Structure formats: C-alpha cells, structure tokens
Image: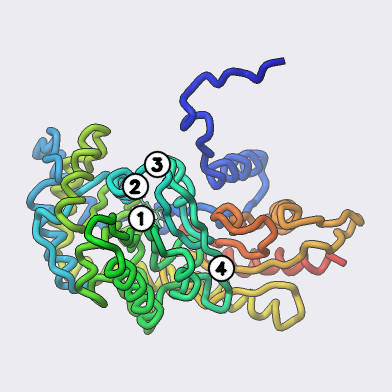
Amino acid sequence: MPEKTPLLSNLAETLIGSEIVRMNGEIKEKMKKGEQIFNFTIGDFDTSIFPIPIELEEEIIHAYRKHFTNYPAGEGEPELRKSVAQFIKERQGPEYSLEEILIASGGRPVIYSAYRAICDEGDKVVYSVPSWNNNHYVHFVKGHHVTVPTSVKNHFMPTAEDLRPHIAGARLLALCSPQNPTGTTFSKKQLEAICDLVIEENARRGSYEKKLYILFDQIYWQLTFGDIVHYDPVSLRPELKEYTIFVDGISKCFAATGVRVGWTMGPEVIISKMKAIMSHIGTWAPLPEQRATSKYLMQKWSVDNNLRQFKSSLHDRLVKIHTGFLHLKKEGYPVDAITPQGGMYLSVKIDAAGKHTAEGSLLHDQSDVTRYLLDEAKLAIVPFSVFGTEENVPWYRLSVGACKIDEIQDMLNKLKSALSNLK
Ligand SMILES: Cc1ncc(COP(=O)(O)O)c(C=O)c1O
C-alpha cells in the first residue's frame, strides 16, 4: 500500500498542537463530571482572582466610547511607542527611538516575526530546555534545532558554559528571563558571561558572515520577587543593542493576556522587516487597547501600586507551595522545589517513577506519575518534557495564575496522601 498522501502543507501536517491546551481539555472534562482538580497547568490568570488594573480597564472602555476603532498604524500608534520608550527607559534603562519599537498583538507575533525576519531554512537556533515554545517557532522557519540541556544546579537557566559548544555558526540564541516554565532568572554574572560569548562570536565572524542575534524574552520582567533584579543584555553590554530583539508586553505583568498588547525593541533594520511581516498577517494590537495602554503605562502611581499588589499575591502563593514541598521533602517524600524568583511559575520535582500504587500497579515512567498525580492527588501540573526536556525528567511547571490561596493546604494534603500510598 502506498503511504497516504498528505492533504496539507508539510508545515501544517507536522505542526504539533499545544500539549498544555490538550491537558486542559482533559482536566475540564474531569471537572465537568464534578471532580475537584487543583489545576496548576495554565499560564493564564483566573480573572476573579487577578483582574486587569481597573485604570487600564477604564481607559479601554473610554477608547471604545471614543470610537478609536480603525486600523492602527502598522508599526503601532506613535503615542504607545512613545509611552513604551519612556516606560523602558525609566524602569529598565535602555533608550530606544520610536523607529526601534514595534507594537504587536501580544508577545507571540513578536517572536514569530523575529524568527521569520532572522532565520532561513536550516539556520541554527540555539535554545535551552526546558523553555517555552521555541521548538514550535524553529519548526515554523524549518530551522536547525540546537537544544541545550540545563541543570537544577543552575535553576534550569542556561550558562555560558552550557551554550559555548553550540554558538559557532548559530543564527539565533533564544533566551528568557524570568523564565517560563521554571520561574527562575539570570543572575548578573550568568547573563554577562552569555553576552560576552555572543560578542566574542560576532567579533570572530567576518564582515561577509551573518551575525548571531539574541531573542530576549522578558515578558515576565516586572514580576521579580524580593532581592531579585531583572538583567537584560543591552543594559549589561550596550554594544549588544545592535544584536538584541526584546519580547515584551502587558500580558503577564498586568494579568492582561486577553487584551493583546505586546511590543519589541530592536535594531531598526530588523524592526522594519518584522513590521512588514506582521502587516501581512495583521497581528496589530487593537487600536482601543493601544490607546488605553499608552495612557496607562504613564500612570506611574497606578502601575507601581498594581505591580506591588500583584507581585505580592503571586509570591505569597508560590512561597506557600514551595514551603509545603520542602516540608514534604524533609518528611522523606520524593519531592523538591526551587525557590521562586520571578514570573508566575514554580519548578517542582515529583520523583515517583518505579514505585507501586496501593493497588499494586507500577508507575513505569514519568507519564505514569503525571497521571497518578491527576487521578489520586487531583493535582494537574505540566511535566518539563512538554518544554523540551527528556521524557523522564521528574520536574514540573506549577502555575499559580488560577490558584486560590486557601486551596493550597488542601492540595498539599492530597499530594502527601497520594505519595504515602506509594510503595
Ligand atoms: C515566555 C513567554 N513569552 C511570550 C509569551 C506570549 O505572550 P502573549 O500572550 O503576549 O502572546 C508567553 C505566554 O505564555 C510566555 O510565557
């Protein structure tokens, strides 16, 4: 029998859908049947716990009432690009002209168009694992995946030593801090060493050779905890301004995932091409939301106040769960967790493969453990393998975007009891 002819493009036939969305479908089915599930899988917010700032909401309503409902400017409304430039300069440091800033409908179109603008088929793209969605974007451009494993010792952030063997000839280095899925960040030293590696590599390349760019995803950068400071390549090494494309926006820092306003800062030559790519797919942020965001970003008191409260609510939840995991570890359960540094995620370890359930069935591998956690502890979390690690890595991403603080103890009790039943 001849093989079935594919109906669609090679891209469409080979694209992998989101594993997290699939898991969520299953969880929702269980919940519909009345099961109580502690759903810590999604990178989104429960709006009854984390609504967008009221001042932003009011600006959006006001913009619609004013009928700002036309096509926005392809590069984004000048008012918003001005606000972004000022916001970044005041809060982060680097200075960007309006021509070096592009507005999009969230972070995703920024990432997609950056990949499209920089990479040709077969180009080497270096990214560490676990990391968020780089595998899919590399697939889009038919790039050559260079995945770099990371270690718990470095909080699953890549180091210059991890990256060094893979940098020669690479076209794009994708970095993210605070990182999805780990909730950890680059230290100054770590990121400086990576920056120096890129500078060294670009200096080594002849003028005829294409350069290495950094795609620096800082969509969670306002959400750092305690003494943790957010570092970026351009503030640390200004000469990297020529080679760095930022991914940024309001989705995470203002719990505004559905508002769809993102932006990028980068070299004008690349930004203008990204704008052209986006104009063909129409991934502009809606005009009323652009107008509203440009006003909101300049409301310093409200932004500071909202961020303070929001960060503290996320941090309280993360710390409570982290502490609970460390208690279980002390009591001898096969679990661990990494101190949360930023974002909305916690890295937790549940190392139960090879154990037997009370009914005597063997948990062969990590996917059996994931299923056991869902069935017995009613705990839904995302295995790191979804973010590109090997299948049997016992670490998970736990998201607190939909976490009610008074459910945490309940969840920990259920987890303890499920683990106690294992032999
Ligand atoms: C690291 C990272 N970058 C970018 C995005 C995309 O954000 P947006 O919802 O603005 O497209 C996400 C969303 O989960 C993310 O986790």
Identify the amino acid type marked 3: Glu
The answer to whether the residue labelled 1 contacts the one labelled 2, judged by CB atoms less than 8 Å apart, is: yes
Between 353 and 276, the one lying in front of the other is 276
Q: Provide the residue designation for mark 3.
A: 121
The answer to whether the residue labelled 1 contacts the one labelled 3, judged by CB atoms less than 8 Å apart, is: no
- The crowding category of the residue bearing disc 3, from other C-alpha atoms within 10 Å (few below 14, some 14 to 19, many at least 20), is few
Residue 399 visible in the picture: no
Q: Provide the residue designation for mark 2.
A: 119
Between 290 and 209, the one lying in front of the other is 209
Where residue 195 sits: x, y (%)?
33, 73
Identify the amino acid type marked 1: Arg
Q: Provide the residue designation for mark 4.
A: 347
Q: Residue furthest right?
A: 360
Label 3 and label 4: CA atoms lie apart by: 34 Å
- Specify which label sits upstream in the sequence, 4 or 2: 2
Q: Provide the residue designation for mark 1.
A: 171
Label 4 and label 2: CA atoms lie apart by: 31 Å
- Specify which label sits upstream in the sequence, 1 or 2: 2
Identify the amino acid type marked 2: Cys
Between 272 and 239, the one lying in front of the other is 239
- Specify which label sits upstream in the sequence, 1 or 3: 3
Q: Nearer the viewer, mark 1 or mark 4?
A: 1
Left or right: residue 319 compared with residue 203 = right
Pick the quarter of the image with the N terminus: top right
Could you tell me which residue is drawn at 26 percent across and 51 percent down? 262
Label 2 and label 3: CA atoms lie apart by: 7 Å
